[in-house]
Image (spheres, helix red, strand yellow):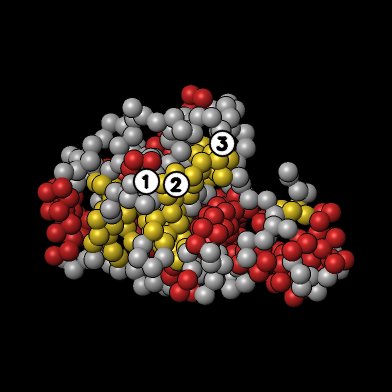
Amino acid sequence: MTAAVNLLDFDAARLAAYFAGLGEKPFRAKQALRWIHRFGQRDFDAMTDIARSLREKLKSGAGIVPPPIVADRLSDDDTRKFLFDVGGGNAVESVFIPEDDRGTLCVSTQAGCALDCAFCATGKQGFNRNLTAAEIIGQLWQVNKVLGDERGVHPVAAAGERVIGNVVLMGMGEPLANFENLVTALRLMLDDNAYGLSRRRVTVSTAGLTPMLDRLRDECPVALAVSLHAPDDALRDQLVPINRKYPLRELMAACLRYLEKAPRDFVTFEYAMLDGVNDSENHARRLLGLTRDVPCKFNLIPFNPFPGSSFRRSSPPRLRRFAEILMNAGIVTTIRKTRGEDIDAACGQLAGRVRDKTRRSGRPVIGIHEVRSP
Ligand code: SAH
Protein backbone atom coordinates (compact mmCIF):
# COMPACT_ATOMS: atom_id res chain seq x y z
CA MET A 1 0.00 0.00 0.00
CA THR A 2 1.34 3.43 -0.84
CA ALA A 3 -0.18 6.17 1.28
CA ALA A 4 -0.67 9.64 -0.14
CA VAL A 5 1.57 10.98 2.61
CA ASN A 6 4.18 8.78 4.25
CA LEU A 7 4.77 10.11 7.77
CA LEU A 8 8.19 8.43 7.82
CA ASP A 9 9.29 11.15 5.39
CA PHE A 10 8.83 13.84 8.06
CA ASP A 11 11.20 15.02 10.76
CA ALA A 12 9.70 16.89 13.74
CA ALA A 13 9.47 20.25 11.96
CA ARG A 14 7.86 18.78 8.87
CA LEU A 15 5.43 16.70 10.87
CA ALA A 16 4.43 19.81 12.83
CA ALA A 17 3.86 21.65 9.56
CA TYR A 18 1.76 18.77 8.26
CA PHE A 19 -0.30 18.74 11.44
CA ALA A 20 -0.71 22.51 11.28
CA GLY A 21 -2.13 22.02 7.80
CA LEU A 22 -4.71 19.67 9.36
CA GLY A 23 -5.57 22.40 11.87
CA GLU A 24 -3.82 20.61 14.75
CA LYS A 25 -1.58 21.90 17.52
CA PRO A 26 2.18 21.27 17.26
CA PHE A 27 2.28 19.04 20.37
CA ARG A 28 0.14 16.53 18.51
CA ALA A 29 3.03 16.07 16.11
CA LYS A 30 5.32 15.24 19.02
CA GLN A 31 2.88 12.63 20.25
CA ALA A 32 2.67 11.10 16.81
CA LEU A 33 6.45 11.13 16.43
CA ARG A 34 6.78 9.15 19.64
CA TRP A 35 4.20 6.59 18.58
CA ILE A 36 5.75 6.16 15.18
CA HIS A 37 9.42 5.98 16.06
CA ARG A 38 9.74 5.19 19.75
CA PHE A 39 7.06 2.54 19.80
CA GLY A 40 7.19 1.43 16.19
CA GLN A 41 3.45 1.88 15.82
CA ARG A 42 1.87 1.98 12.36
CA ASP A 43 -1.75 1.68 13.39
CA PHE A 44 -3.31 5.08 14.03
CA ASP A 45 -6.10 3.51 16.10
CA ALA A 46 -3.52 2.27 18.60
CA MET A 47 -2.33 5.85 19.22
CA THR A 48 -4.64 6.14 22.16
CA ASP A 49 -3.78 9.63 23.38
CA ILE A 50 -4.52 11.12 19.98
CA ALA A 51 -8.11 12.33 19.55
CA ARG A 52 -10.32 10.09 17.50
CA SER A 53 -11.12 12.87 15.05
CA LEU A 54 -7.42 13.37 14.30
CA ARG A 55 -6.88 9.63 13.97
CA GLU A 56 -9.63 9.55 11.36
CA LYS A 57 -7.99 12.40 9.44
CA LEU A 58 -4.64 10.60 9.52
CA LYS A 59 -6.19 7.32 8.44
CA SER A 60 -7.69 8.91 5.38
CA GLY A 61 -4.66 10.87 4.21
CA ALA A 62 -1.50 9.34 5.58
CA GLY A 63 0.35 6.15 6.36
CA ILE A 64 3.51 4.90 8.02
CA VAL A 65 5.19 2.92 5.27
CA PRO A 66 8.71 1.57 5.73
CA PRO A 67 10.36 -0.43 2.95
CA PRO A 68 9.42 -4.10 3.38
CA ILE A 69 12.05 -6.57 4.56
CA VAL A 70 12.50 -9.24 1.89
CA ALA A 71 15.39 -11.15 3.44
CA ASP A 72 16.85 -11.43 6.92
CA ARG A 73 19.99 -13.49 7.27
CA LEU A 74 22.15 -14.23 10.27
CA SER A 75 25.88 -14.76 9.87
CA ASP A 76 27.96 -17.26 11.84
CA ASP A 77 29.46 -14.29 13.72
CA ASP A 78 25.99 -12.93 14.61
CA THR A 79 26.10 -10.11 12.07
CA ARG A 80 22.61 -9.86 10.64
CA LYS A 81 21.72 -8.55 7.22
CA PHE A 82 18.33 -7.15 6.28
CA LEU A 83 17.40 -6.68 2.65
CA PHE A 84 14.71 -4.11 1.82
CA ASP A 85 12.65 -3.92 -1.34
CA VAL A 86 12.54 -0.29 -2.50
CA GLY A 87 10.60 -0.99 -5.68
CA GLY A 88 11.50 -1.13 -9.34
CA GLY A 89 13.65 -4.22 -8.85
CA ASN A 90 15.94 -2.42 -6.40
CA ALA A 91 16.99 -3.66 -3.03
CA VAL A 92 19.08 -2.00 -0.34
CA GLU A 93 20.58 -3.42 2.80
CA SER A 94 21.13 -2.72 6.45
CA VAL A 95 23.56 -4.68 8.54
CA PHE A 96 23.16 -5.07 12.29
CA ILE A 97 26.44 -5.67 14.11
CA PRO A 98 25.85 -6.75 17.70
CA GLU A 99 28.31 -5.60 20.33
CA ASP A 100 28.43 -6.34 24.04
CA ASP A 101 25.57 -4.28 25.36
CA ARG A 102 24.04 -2.89 22.20
CA GLY A 103 24.58 -2.94 18.48
CA THR A 104 25.44 -0.80 15.49
CA LEU A 105 23.19 -0.55 12.48
CA CYS A 106 24.79 0.19 9.12
CA VAL A 107 22.24 1.93 6.88
CA SER A 108 22.05 2.59 3.12
CA THR A 109 21.28 5.97 1.56
CA GLN A 110 21.06 5.21 -2.17
CA ALA A 111 20.08 2.31 -4.41
CA GLY A 112 23.43 1.76 -6.11
CA CYS A 113 26.06 4.49 -6.17
CA ALA A 114 27.40 6.87 -8.81
CA LEU A 115 30.92 7.27 -7.41
CA ASP A 116 32.28 4.01 -8.80
CA CYS A 117 35.19 3.51 -6.41
CA ALA A 118 37.47 0.90 -7.97
CA PHE A 119 37.18 -1.66 -5.17
CA CYS A 120 33.48 -1.33 -4.25
CA ALA A 121 30.77 -3.78 -5.32
CA THR A 122 27.98 -1.22 -4.94
CA GLY A 123 29.71 1.04 -7.45
CA LYS A 124 29.77 -1.80 -9.97
CA GLN A 125 25.98 -1.89 -9.92
CA GLY A 126 25.77 1.69 -11.12
CA PHE A 127 23.51 4.32 -9.66
CA ASN A 128 19.81 3.83 -9.57
CA ARG A 129 18.30 6.48 -7.33
CA ASN A 130 18.38 8.33 -4.05
CA LEU A 131 16.45 6.75 -1.22
CA THR A 132 13.67 8.84 0.25
CA ALA A 133 13.94 9.95 3.88
CA ALA A 134 11.29 7.32 4.66
CA GLU A 135 13.41 4.62 3.06
CA ILE A 136 16.49 5.69 5.02
CA ILE A 137 14.83 6.03 8.43
CA GLY A 138 12.56 3.11 7.52
CA GLN A 139 15.56 0.75 7.71
CA LEU A 140 16.14 1.82 11.31
CA TRP A 141 12.39 1.70 12.04
CA GLN A 142 12.14 -1.86 10.76
CA VAL A 143 15.24 -3.29 12.38
CA ASN A 144 14.42 -1.59 15.69
CA LYS A 145 11.02 -3.20 15.61
CA VAL A 146 12.20 -6.66 14.64
CA LEU A 147 14.92 -6.70 17.30
CA GLY A 148 12.75 -5.02 19.92
CA ASP A 149 9.95 -7.57 19.39
CA GLU A 150 12.42 -10.45 19.57
CA ARG A 151 13.91 -9.20 22.80
CA GLY A 152 10.68 -8.06 24.34
CA VAL A 153 11.82 -4.47 24.84
CA HIS A 154 10.44 -1.29 23.45
CA PRO A 155 12.59 -0.52 20.41
CA VAL A 156 13.71 2.80 21.84
CA ALA A 157 13.48 1.97 25.52
CA ALA A 158 15.63 3.35 28.30
CA ALA A 159 19.11 4.12 27.04
CA GLY A 160 20.67 1.06 28.69
CA GLU A 161 18.18 -1.26 27.06
CA ARG A 162 18.39 0.24 23.62
CA VAL A 163 18.86 -2.36 20.93
CA ILE A 164 20.53 -0.08 18.42
CA GLY A 165 23.04 2.21 20.10
CA ASN A 166 24.91 3.48 17.04
CA VAL A 167 23.96 4.17 13.47
CA VAL A 168 26.56 4.39 10.73
CA LEU A 169 25.64 5.65 7.27
CA MET A 170 28.07 3.25 5.65
CA GLY A 171 25.79 1.02 3.64
CA MET A 172 25.08 1.36 -0.05
CA GLY A 173 25.46 4.77 -1.61
CA GLU A 174 27.12 8.10 -0.92
CA PRO A 175 25.18 9.80 1.90
CA LEU A 176 26.25 13.34 0.99
CA ALA A 177 25.00 12.87 -2.57
CA ASN A 178 21.49 12.51 -1.11
CA PHE A 179 21.80 15.44 1.23
CA GLU A 180 18.23 16.60 1.94
CA ASN A 181 16.89 13.13 2.65
CA LEU A 182 19.97 12.22 4.65
CA VAL A 183 19.55 15.24 6.92
CA THR A 184 15.84 14.55 7.45
CA ALA A 185 16.70 10.99 8.50
CA LEU A 186 19.58 12.20 10.71
CA ARG A 187 17.27 14.65 12.51
CA LEU A 188 14.94 11.77 13.35
CA MET A 189 17.84 9.66 14.62
CA LEU A 190 18.82 12.52 16.94
CA ASP A 191 15.31 13.57 18.02
CA ASP A 192 14.45 12.69 21.62
CA ASN A 193 10.90 11.94 20.58
CA ALA A 194 12.17 9.53 17.95
CA TYR A 195 15.44 7.56 18.34
CA GLY A 196 17.22 9.94 20.71
CA LEU A 197 20.76 9.03 19.65
CA SER A 198 23.55 11.42 20.53
CA ARG A 199 25.41 13.11 17.68
CA ARG A 200 28.49 11.14 18.62
CA ARG A 201 26.68 7.87 18.00
CA VAL A 202 25.58 8.66 14.47
CA THR A 203 28.36 8.55 11.86
CA VAL A 204 28.19 9.72 8.27
CA SER A 205 30.79 8.13 6.00
CA THR A 206 31.69 9.98 2.82
CA ALA A 207 34.06 9.60 -0.09
CA GLY A 208 34.63 13.34 0.28
CA LEU A 209 32.05 15.62 -1.34
CA THR A 210 33.62 18.71 0.20
CA PRO A 211 30.88 21.32 -0.43
CA MET A 212 28.37 18.97 1.15
CA LEU A 213 30.68 18.40 4.12
CA ASP A 214 30.44 22.10 4.82
CA ARG A 215 26.67 21.95 4.62
CA LEU A 216 26.52 18.95 6.95
CA ARG A 217 28.71 20.85 9.42
CA ASP A 218 26.32 23.79 9.35
CA GLU A 219 23.01 21.96 9.22
CA CYS A 220 23.41 18.74 11.16
CA PRO A 221 26.91 17.89 12.43
CA VAL A 222 27.35 14.27 13.47
CA ALA A 223 30.43 12.05 13.76
CA LEU A 224 32.40 11.90 10.52
CA ALA A 225 34.21 9.12 8.68
CA VAL A 226 36.05 9.88 5.44
CA SER A 227 37.04 7.19 2.95
CA LEU A 228 40.66 8.03 2.25
CA HIS A 229 42.24 4.90 0.71
CA ALA A 230 45.33 6.67 -0.69
CA PRO A 231 47.99 9.13 0.48
CA ASP A 232 48.26 11.09 -2.78
CA ASP A 233 46.03 12.41 -5.56
CA ALA A 234 47.54 10.24 -8.29
CA LEU A 235 46.52 7.02 -6.55
CA ARG A 236 43.29 8.37 -5.06
CA ASP A 237 42.18 9.59 -8.49
CA GLN A 238 42.28 5.94 -9.55
CA LEU A 239 40.67 4.38 -6.50
CA VAL A 240 38.11 7.05 -5.60
CA PRO A 241 37.34 8.90 -8.85
CA ILE A 242 35.48 11.74 -7.10
CA ASN A 243 38.96 12.80 -5.97
CA ARG A 244 39.50 14.31 -9.42
CA LYS A 245 36.80 16.82 -8.55
CA TYR A 246 37.63 17.29 -4.86
CA PRO A 247 41.34 16.55 -4.40
CA LEU A 248 43.07 15.74 -1.13
CA ARG A 249 44.18 19.25 -0.20
CA GLU A 250 40.63 20.46 -0.42
CA LEU A 251 39.35 17.39 1.42
CA MET A 252 41.78 17.84 4.32
CA ALA A 253 40.78 21.50 4.60
CA ALA A 254 37.10 20.52 4.62
CA CYS A 255 37.80 18.00 7.40
CA LEU A 256 39.39 20.73 9.50
CA ARG A 257 36.43 23.02 8.95
CA TYR A 258 34.08 20.17 9.87
CA LEU A 259 35.87 19.60 13.14
CA GLU A 260 35.08 23.15 14.24
CA LYS A 261 31.48 22.06 14.80
CA ALA A 262 31.68 18.27 15.01
CA PRO A 263 30.50 16.37 18.10
CA ARG A 264 33.78 14.45 18.17
CA ASP A 265 37.21 16.03 18.04
CA PHE A 266 38.60 13.75 15.35
CA VAL A 267 37.78 12.44 11.89
CA THR A 268 37.90 8.70 11.25
CA PHE A 269 39.79 7.93 8.07
CA GLU A 270 38.72 4.67 6.48
CA TYR A 271 41.36 2.92 4.45
CA ALA A 272 40.69 -0.27 2.48
CA MET A 273 43.86 -2.35 2.49
CA LEU A 274 44.55 -3.43 -1.09
CA ASP A 275 47.48 -5.77 -1.53
CA GLY A 276 50.36 -4.16 -3.43
CA VAL A 277 48.25 -1.10 -4.30
CA ASN A 278 48.08 1.21 -1.28
CA ASP A 279 49.48 -0.86 1.59
CA SER A 280 53.27 -0.31 1.62
CA GLU A 281 55.28 1.25 4.44
CA ASN A 282 55.87 4.19 2.18
CA HIS A 283 52.14 4.72 1.73
CA ALA A 284 51.71 4.67 5.51
CA ARG A 285 54.48 7.24 6.02
CA ARG A 286 53.03 9.52 3.41
CA LEU A 287 49.65 9.31 5.11
CA LEU A 288 51.29 10.76 8.21
CA GLY A 289 52.34 13.77 6.17
CA LEU A 290 48.97 14.18 4.51
CA THR A 291 46.98 14.08 7.73
CA ARG A 292 49.51 15.91 9.92
CA ASP A 293 47.20 18.83 10.66
CA VAL A 294 43.95 16.88 10.98
CA PRO A 295 43.10 15.27 14.34
CA CYS A 296 42.18 11.77 13.21
CA LYS A 297 41.93 8.06 13.83
CA PHE A 298 42.46 5.40 11.21
CA ASN A 299 40.23 2.44 10.52
CA LEU A 300 41.96 -0.05 8.25
CA ILE A 301 39.50 -2.25 6.37
CA PRO A 302 40.86 -5.51 4.98
CA PHE A 303 39.62 -5.51 1.38
CA ASN A 304 36.49 -7.61 0.95
CA PRO A 305 36.70 -9.40 -2.37
CA PHE A 306 33.60 -9.89 -4.51
CA PRO A 307 33.07 -11.71 -7.80
CA GLY A 308 34.82 -9.83 -10.58
CA SER A 309 37.01 -7.68 -8.31
CA SER A 310 40.65 -7.53 -9.32
CA PHE A 311 42.12 -6.52 -5.95
CA ARG A 312 43.44 -8.76 -3.22
CA ARG A 313 43.34 -8.32 0.54
CA SER A 314 46.62 -7.25 2.15
CA SER A 315 48.31 -10.03 4.12
CA PRO A 316 48.05 -9.86 7.93
CA PRO A 317 51.76 -9.01 8.39
CA ARG A 318 51.53 -6.19 5.85
CA LEU A 319 48.40 -4.91 7.54
CA ARG A 320 50.06 -5.03 10.95
CA ARG A 321 53.18 -3.24 9.71
CA PHE A 322 51.03 -0.51 8.14
CA ALA A 323 49.05 -0.08 11.37
CA GLU A 324 52.27 0.03 13.40
CA ILE A 325 53.64 2.96 11.43
CA LEU A 326 50.47 4.95 12.06
CA MET A 327 50.35 3.98 15.71
CA ASN A 328 54.02 4.75 16.31
CA ALA A 329 53.24 8.25 15.11
CA GLY A 330 50.56 8.47 17.80
CA ILE A 331 47.49 7.89 15.63
CA VAL A 332 44.84 5.63 17.10
CA THR A 333 44.45 2.89 14.51
CA THR A 334 41.97 0.04 14.41
CA ILE A 335 41.76 -2.85 12.01
CA ARG A 336 38.16 -3.53 11.15
CA LYS A 337 37.02 -7.03 11.92
CA THR A 338 35.80 -8.67 8.78
CA ARG A 339 32.34 -9.69 9.81
CA GLY A 340 29.36 -11.03 7.96
CA GLU A 341 31.36 -12.36 5.04
CA ASP A 342 29.38 -15.58 4.88
CA ILE A 343 26.18 -13.60 4.27
CA ASP A 344 27.73 -11.03 1.93
CA ALA A 345 27.27 -8.33 4.54
CA ALA A 346 30.85 -7.11 4.53
CA CYS A 347 31.81 -3.63 3.37
CA GLY A 348 31.20 -2.98 -0.28
CA GLN A 349 29.42 -6.26 -0.83
CA LEU A 350 25.99 -5.03 -0.02
CA ALA A 351 23.28 -6.18 -2.41
CA GLY A 352 26.00 -7.16 -4.84
CA ARG A 353 24.26 -10.46 -5.30
CA VAL A 354 20.91 -8.94 -5.98
CA ARG A 355 21.46 -7.01 -9.12
CA ASP A 356 24.24 -5.76 -11.25
CA LYS A 357 24.53 -3.30 -14.08
CA THR A 358 23.75 -5.91 -16.68
CA ARG A 359 20.36 -6.72 -15.24
CA ARG A 360 19.26 -3.27 -14.27
CA SER A 361 15.77 -3.40 -15.69
CA GLY A 362 13.19 -4.51 -13.30
CA ARG A 363 13.81 -8.07 -12.17
CA PRO A 364 11.99 -8.58 -8.94
CA VAL A 365 14.04 -8.72 -5.78
CA ILE A 366 12.13 -11.53 -4.21
CA GLY A 367 13.32 -14.84 -5.53
CA ILE A 368 16.83 -13.80 -6.41
CA HIS A 369 18.01 -12.55 -3.05
CA GLU A 370 19.14 -15.96 -1.94
CA VAL A 371 21.43 -16.48 -4.90
CA ARG A 372 24.91 -17.10 -3.51
CA SER A 373 28.29 -17.47 -5.05
CA PRO A 374 29.52 -21.07 -5.07
N1 SAH B 1 29.98 6.23 0.13
C1 SAH B 1 30.41 6.17 1.51
C2 SAH B 1 29.99 4.88 2.19
C3 SAH B 1 30.67 3.70 1.57
S1 SAH B 1 30.77 2.13 2.38
C4 SAH B 1 31.91 6.33 1.56
O1 SAH B 1 32.55 6.31 0.53
O2 SAH B 1 32.44 6.52 2.65
C5 SAH B 1 31.82 2.32 3.74
C6 SAH B 1 33.30 2.03 3.52
O3 SAH B 1 33.58 0.77 2.94
C7 SAH B 1 33.97 3.07 2.62
O4 SAH B 1 35.16 3.49 3.23
C8 SAH B 1 34.24 2.27 1.39
O5 SAH B 1 35.27 2.85 0.62
C9 SAH B 1 34.59 0.93 1.95
N2 SAH B 1 34.53 -0.18 1.00
C10 SAH B 1 33.76 -0.29 -0.11
N3 SAH B 1 33.99 -1.45 -0.73
C11 SAH B 1 34.92 -2.12 -0.01
C12 SAH B 1 35.55 -3.39 -0.13
N4 SAH B 1 35.24 -4.21 -1.14
N5 SAH B 1 36.45 -3.73 0.79
C13 SAH B 1 36.74 -2.91 1.83
N6 SAH B 1 36.16 -1.71 2.01
C14 SAH B 1 35.27 -1.30 1.10
The crowding category of the residue bearing disc 2, from other C-alpha atoms within 10 Å (few below 14, some 14 to 19, many at least 20), is many
**To which quarter of the image does residue 166 belong?**
bottom left
Q: Is residue 20 left or right of residue 212?
A: right
Q: Specify the amino acid type for callout 3.
A: Asn
Q: Is mark 1 within 8 Å of ligand 1?
A: no
The crowding category of the residue bearing disc 1, from other C-alpha atoms within 10 Å (few below 14, some 14 to 19, many at least 20), is some
Residue 192 in view here: yes
Q: Where is residue 152 shown, x and y percent of the image? A: 53, 64
Secondary structure of the residue carrying tag 1 is loop
* Picture disc at residue 90: 3
Q: Where is residue 358 shown, x and y percent of the image? A: 48, 24
| Foreground: disc 3 or disc 1 | 1
* Picture disc at residue 75: 1
Q: Earlier in the sequence, mark 3 or mark 1?
A: 1
Q: Is residue 165 left or right of residue 276?
A: right
Secondary structure of the residue carrying tag 3 is loop
What residue lies at 23% left-to-right and 61% top-to-bottom? 333
Q: Specify the amino acid type for callout 1.
A: Ser
Q: Specify the amino acid type for callout 2.
A: Lys
| Foreground: disc 2 or disc 1 | 1
What residue lies at 38% left-to-right and 68% top-to-bottom? 101
State which quarter of the image contains the N terminus.
top right
* Picture disc at residue 81: 2
Q: Is residue 121 above or below residue 64?
A: above
In space, the residues marked 3 and 1 are separated at their CA atoms by 23 Å
Q: Is residue 85 left or right of residue 53?
A: left
The crowding category of the residue bearing disc 3, from other C-alpha atoms within 10 Å (few below 14, some 14 to 19, many at least 20), is many
State which quarter of the image contains the C terminus.
top left
